[in-house]
Amino acid sequence: MIKKLSFSYKKDGRLNGCRLNLSKDILNFLSITEENNNIIFEYKNDEIILKYGKTLVEQEQKTENGKILLLIKNYKVKFDKVGKYKSPKLVIPLPIINSLGLTEEKKDVVITLLDDAVSIKPNVEGKVDRKGKVYTIKVNKGGVGKTFLTVQLSVGLSLIGKKVLILTSDSQNNVLDYTAPQEHKPIFDSGLKAFVKGEDGDIVRIRENVDFIPLEDSKFSTTFLNNLPKFIEKMKIEYDFVLIDSIPTMKLDTIFVECSDKVIIPCFCDRVTVEGVINVVEEAGIDKVFSIIVNKYRNTTNQNKYLNDLKNVLGETTILLPEPIKELSQIETLLEKGKSVWETNSKGLQEVQDSLIEVIKGM
């Protein structure tokens, strides 16, 4: 995976610090918690290696001009409070940042999970393939609009020239219902499970530059679950974006989230759904959540209350909360025809498009 470092500066413009936000999958891999946050920080040969625990012997070797050749030290992962949540960060020593040639303009690093450690290297242009981004649209509740938003974002991205692939953990493949009228609904023989096995499967072209790989059924072997991440990595090379329409399907859903760069959470403005959103944020990790999109919004006292609650919870985070998507009869009519909100001249849907555009611009 590729991540960006965050740089901070003194008032006079000099570099003050550099940190890497650690996603929940990295924390889980290293068994790091707020209470058990000790790691061994090792640097050599232009590579940072992180391991859980403590070393008995710390080492440091430098050249005559002060450049670090080797560093092995005990470090702690910092858990900074951001609003209601804790954001885990790794502070990287500035001499190592200088040795790696990382700057504000060149701040991408490649993170690789090894057998028992995490590798961090500079993303050297030409050595690492440009890869697309993976977004999972997820919430632990049905009927909130995951499939609807997956389709609208996919078509919207295609309209700005991006090539998009939609995957799903829903064997009902409702994406097809949202993109074609019932009488023209595509039929498929095989899909995701076949591709993951290395066999030929069906790719459904639902719009220009938008492909969909259907899911055959909800029975997942251990081999399929183990090989799924490799397939997603392959798709990231072929597509600018992979969007995953996710339902809570235990292990499969977990793998989809782990493979994702970011998570987008749709929600209603009611108590149960807002609580569910907070749970998903905590499950995925605050740094992995890109946006929360309020869907089917009605301007009532109760919904306004829960919308304000959401705004207060997210106020000190970087999570994007666009203007709510209102409950509109025009949307229902379009869905019945298998059309997206981009395939209409209705002025009543301009606000919906504006909210989605705000999300798309940040993706």
Image (spheres, grey):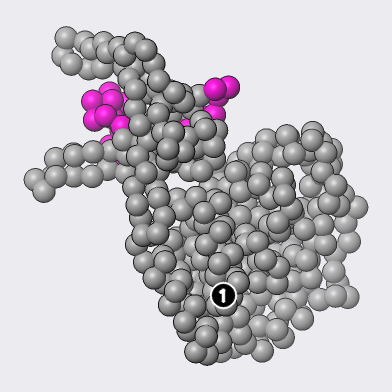
User: For residue 138, what is the image quadrant?
Assistant: bottom right
Q: Which residues are magenta?
A: 92-116
Judge whether residue 183 can be spotted in this image.
yes
Q: Position of residue 339 (x, y in %)?
A: 71, 76
Residue located at (26% from left, 10% from top): 61
Q: Position of residue 241 (x, y in %)?
A: 59, 52
Residue type marked 1: Arg
Residue 276 falls inside the magenta stretch: no
Residue located at (66% from left, 55% from top): 244
Residue located at (81% from left, 53% from top): 215
On screen, residue 307 versus residue 298, left or right, reads: left
Q: Position of residue 54 (x, y in %)?
A: 40, 20
| Secondary structure beneath label 1 | helix
Picture layout, residue 303 above or below residue 128: below
290 or 303, nearer to the observer: 303
Picture layout, residue 236 above or below residue 355: above
